[in-house]
C-alpha cells in the first residue's frame, strides 16, 4: 500500500472513533487460563482423595494429627521437588537429588562434624549439609553446561557416585545425631505446626518468588523454552544452566538436613528413590518435562496429592505394590494430559 493510500485510509477514520479493542495474544490468554485450570484440577483431585480417605478410614483420616503427619511427610520430598521444578523448567533433569540428600545427611552427622557442632553451634551441621548439596549440584552443572554431557547421564553418574561416597563415609552404618540443640530445633512446633512443615512453606514461597517475580525465573523459562533463542537474546545459557543444577543441589542439601532432623540419623540409604518421587510430583503438578513452563503451586499440590494418597492407602492397610501401581497410573495420566495440552498449544499458535 502506497503512502497516499495509507494517508487516505487514516483520513477516513473519524477523529472521535473509539480505538479498536486490544485482544490479548491467543497463546498468552490460553496459558493463563490453562494454569488456573490445571491448579483447579489438582485441587479437585486432592479433595477427591481426601473424600475417599474420610469414607474409607473415617476418623483415623479426618484428624488434625493425621493432617500434620501428611504435611510432615510431604515436607522433605516437597523441598526436593521445588529444586527439581527449576531444573525441569530449564529443560533439564536431575536424577541425583535423592543420593545427594543421603550424602548430605551422612556428611552432616559424621563424628567430626558433630564434635564441631557441639563445640560451637549446631548450625555447623546445617552449613555442612547445604555445602555438600551445592557442591554436588555445581559438579552436575559444570559437566552438563560446559562439559556438554547429557543431563540424564551426568546426574545418573552423580547418583551412583554420591550414594557410594555416602556408604564409604558412613561405613554402611547409621550415624546417630547426638547434638541436643539440633534435635530440639527440629522437634519444635511453632503454632502447633512441625518445624519441617514451616521449612517446606518457606522454601515453597521463596521458590515461587524466584520463579515468578525475578529475572532469574524468567531466564529459566526462556532457557527451557528455547535455549538458542535465549542465547541470542543475551542470556548466558551455560552459566544459567549451572546455576539451576546448583539450586537443585541446594534443595537436596536442605532436604538432607530435614531428613536428619526427622530421623536423627544419617544413613547412606536416606533419600533412596526420592528423585523419582520428586520428578513425579513436578510432572503431575503441571511443569512440562520438555521445559519452558514451570509451576511451584502445581508442584506443591502434586507433592500433597502423592503424600495424601500414600496415607489413604496406609490407613486402609493396602500393600505397597498397590500404592506403586496407583502412582504409576497417575504419572502416566499426567504425562498424557501434558501431551494433549502441548498439542493444543502448538495448534493454537
Image: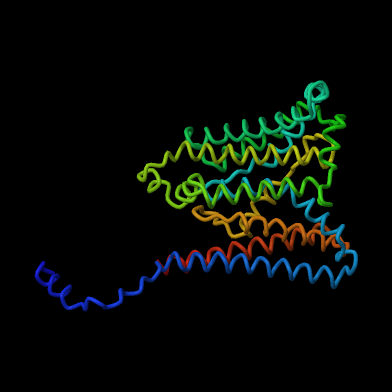
Residue drawn at the location 62% of the way across and 45% of the way down: 83
The colour scheme used to paint the residues is rainbow
Pick out the residue farthest to the right.
59
Pick out the residue farthest to the front.
16
Where does the image place residue 307, in percent across and percent down from the top left? 76, 57
Where does the image place residue 106, in percent across and percent down from the top left? 77, 31
Front-most of residues 198 and 235:
198
Q: Is residue 349 above or below residue 174?
A: below
Q: Is residue 126 left or right of residue 312?
A: left
Where does the image place residue 37, in percent across and percent down from the top left? 58, 69
Q: Is residue 81 above or below residue 39?
A: above
Q: Quadrant of the C terminus?
A: bottom left
Residue drawn at the location 10% of the way across and 68% of the way down: 2
Q: Is residue 122 left or right of residue 229?
A: right
Labels in figure, total? 0
Q: Is residue 13 above or below residue 256?
A: below
Instruction: Decide if residue 107 is in sight here.
Output: no
Front-most of residues 275 and 249:
249
Residue drawn at the location 53% of the way across and 67% of the way down: 34
**Which of the 4 image quadrants contains residue 256?**
top right
Instruction: Decide if residue 334 is in sight here.
Output: yes
Front-most of residues 130 and 165:
130
Where does the image place residue 262, in percent across and percent down from the top left? 82, 42
Q: Is residue 224 left or right of residue 330?
A: left
Q: Is residue 344 left or right of residue 59?
A: left
Q: Quadrant of the N terminus?
A: bottom left
Amino acid at each position: 500500500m502506497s503512502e497516499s493510500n495509507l494517508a487516505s485510509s487514516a483520513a477516513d477514520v473519524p477523529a472521535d472513533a473509539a480505538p479498536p479493542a486490544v485482544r490479548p495474544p491467543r497463546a498468552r490468554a490460553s496459558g493463563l487460563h490453562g494454569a488456573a485450570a490445571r491448579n483447579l484440577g489438582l485441587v479437585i483431585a486432592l479433595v477427591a482423595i481426601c473424600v475417599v480417605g474420610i469414607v474409607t478410614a473415617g476418623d483415623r483420616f479426618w484428624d488434625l494429627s493425621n493432617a500434620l503427619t501428611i504435611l510432615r511427610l510431604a515436607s522433605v520430598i516437597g523441598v526436593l521437588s521445588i529444586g527439581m521444578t527449576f531444573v525441569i523448567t530449564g529443560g533439564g533433569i536431575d536424577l541425583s537429588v535423592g543420593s545427594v540428600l543421603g550424602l548430605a545427611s551422612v556428611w552432616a552427622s559424621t563424628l567430626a562434624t558433630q564434635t564441631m557442632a557441639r563445640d560451637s553451634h549446631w548450625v555447623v551441621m546445617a552449613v555442612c549439609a547445604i555445602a555438600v548439596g551445592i557442591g554436588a549440584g555445581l559438579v552436575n552443572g559444570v559437566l552438563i553446561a560446559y562439559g556438554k554431557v547429557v543431563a540424564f547421564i551426568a546426574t545418573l553418574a552423580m547418583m551412583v557416585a554420591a550414594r557410594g561416597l555416602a556408604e564409604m563415609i558412613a561405613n554402611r552404618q547409621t550415624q546417630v545425631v547426638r547434638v541436643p540443640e539440633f534435635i530440639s530445633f527440629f522437634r519444635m512446633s511453632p503454632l502447633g505446626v512441625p518445624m519441617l512443615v514451616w521449612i517446606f512453606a518457606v522454601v515453597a514461597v521463596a521458590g515461587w518468588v524466584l520463579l515468578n517475580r525475578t529475572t532469574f525465573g524468567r531466564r529459566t523459562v526462556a532457557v527451557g523454552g528455547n535455549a538458542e533463542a535465549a542465547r541470542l537474546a543475551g542470556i548466558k545459557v551455560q552459566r544459567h544452566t549451572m546455576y539451576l543444577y546448583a539450586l537443585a543441589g541446594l534443595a537436596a542439601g536442605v532436604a538432607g538436613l530435614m531428613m536428619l532432623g526427622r530421623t536423627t540419623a544419617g544413613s547412606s540409604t536416606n533419600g533412596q528413590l526420592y528423585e523419582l518421587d520428586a520428578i513425579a510430583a513436578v510432572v503431575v503438578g503441571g511443569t512440562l518435562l520438555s521445559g519452558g513452563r514451570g509451576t511451584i503451586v502445581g508442584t506443591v499440590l502434586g507433592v500433597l496429592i502423592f503424600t495424601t494418597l500414600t496415607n489413604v492407602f496406609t490407613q486402609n492397610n493396602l500393600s505397597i505394590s498397590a500404592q506403586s501401581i496407583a502412582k504409576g497410573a497417575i504419572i502416566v495420566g499426567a504425562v498424557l494430559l501434558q501431551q494433549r495440552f502441548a498439542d493444543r498449544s502448538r495448534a493454537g499458535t
